Image (cartoon, rainbow, N blue to C red):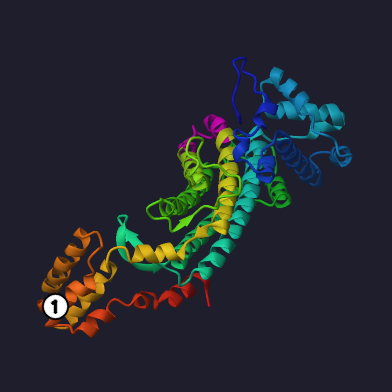
Amino acid sequence: MPGGYFATGTRNIKQESQIMIPRYSRPQMASLWEAESRFRIWFEIEAHALDAMADLGTVPKEAAKAVWDWWATGPAIDVDRIDAIEAVTKHDVIAFLTWVAEQVGPEARFLHQGMTSSDVLDTCLAVQLARAADLLIDDIDQLLEVLKRRAYEHKLTPTIGRSHGIHAEPVTFGLKLAEAYAEFARGRARLVAARADIATCAISGAVGTFANIDPKVEAYVAAKMGLSIEPVSTQVIPRDRHAMFFATLGVVASSIERLATEVRHLQRTEVLEAEEYFSPGQKGSSAMPHKRNPVLTENLTGLARMVRAYALPAMENVALWHERDISHSSVERYIGPDATITLDFALARLTGVVDKLLIYPERMQKNLDRMGGLVHSQRVLLALTQAGASREDSYRLVQRNAMKVWESDGQLSLMELLKADPEVTALLPDSEIEERFDLGYHFKQIDTIFERVFGK
């Protein structure tokens, strides 16, 4: 479980490296948050800072060389030893530096000159979040590719559009997927911006004044770690950056839930226009052998709730005391790994759901025809107004026939009722009424919409 102090007041570093729910973790993202990965980033920050100080002449060049020479031997990170030191020091950065000194020798005393712990911790977190963002952006790219392919596959597959869960007017299934593509493309752009915002380096010393360290050190470390410099870091990087990052993850998670919820609705027995792939040997229920449940998209709905839940504590972290406190630290030990690992898993799962989604055009057509042509009521309404009736009268004429169809549960035909209504036929001949029930009419702008979403 990430973070967490035991009753003794000591933190088990190995425990912090464990993923809360391995079931919802993928190796590449999870490895970013393991203790060994974190310590390797800490070393790079410290060693690059040492190089910069050696170039400035504030520490001996031999010290920097000794540190890098040791690192070149490919040493294993002894997490257990660092953990044991911290059990005494009650300070993670000091424990790490003590362990490095045990390996390097006297030259290690020049590490961390003029720096404070937050310089290492905050810069490390920036690196981890930036690398996590890179993986998430790649996840979205893979999802976008699948959404585009399947959108074109069903570009002109007719289905019913619903508002308030009620039949409205015809759409295509490809259009539903194009909508999802556009939404995730926006999410990708937001995540790119959030990555740029979070990827800042602070090596400014206690309370951020650079009193004991040259700003050139910060610039050097930033360049080496692929970060930009933090203009004003007090003693920590301002947490509004982190708040925006985790809020962005929450929005992407909400987009996942939106598409997952659509699939869940479409898989209902009464609808059954699409459903999750059901693999050979899969079981839907321990009691009912007939069940095929939307378990993946239900899972995605739950995971989205968790990712969103991390946005609020990130926002509450913004208001720290004066130049710093550590009220944010325990929060970030949870939300950093959990939010990124969970979202990474959810994006990959959603990509798989869309890729293998079973789609039933015949059922879509059956549902379109389910209510006796009610889905074409607006076209008749507009035709009556164009024929000279007021909008109020046109609505009344169409609605009184539509309600008969509704109350018959679709057994009656709206077209036939309209053709039998003398007030309607006084304005529209049968041929014009029939023309208003053309399904293809609704799809004449699909190409335009697809060009807006995908380009020409």
Residue 435: x %, y % from top left:
28, 81
Q: Nearer the viewer, residue 293 or 347?
A: 293
Residue 211 in sight: no
Picture layout, residue 62 above or below residue 106 = below
Residue 286: x %, y % from top left:
51, 35
User: What residue is at 27 percent from the left and 78 percent from the top?
Assistant: 436
User: What residue is at 48 percent from the left and 63 percent from the top?
Assistant: 177
Q: In the image, is residue 379 part of the stretch drawn in magenta? A: no
**From the viewer's perspective, is 245 left or right of 60?**
left
Residue 71: x %, y % from top left:
85, 39
Q: Which residues are magenta?
A: 313-332
**From the viewer's perspective, is 376 left or right of 394?**
right
Residue identifier under label 1: 424
Amino acid type at mark 1: Val
Secondary structure found at label 1: helix
Residue 105: x %, y % from top left:
87, 29
Quadrant of the rendering where the N terminus is positioned: top right
What crowding class fits label 1: few (fewer than 14 Cα within 10 Å), some (14-19), or many (20 or more)? many
**From the viewer's perspective, is 180 left or right of 52?**
left
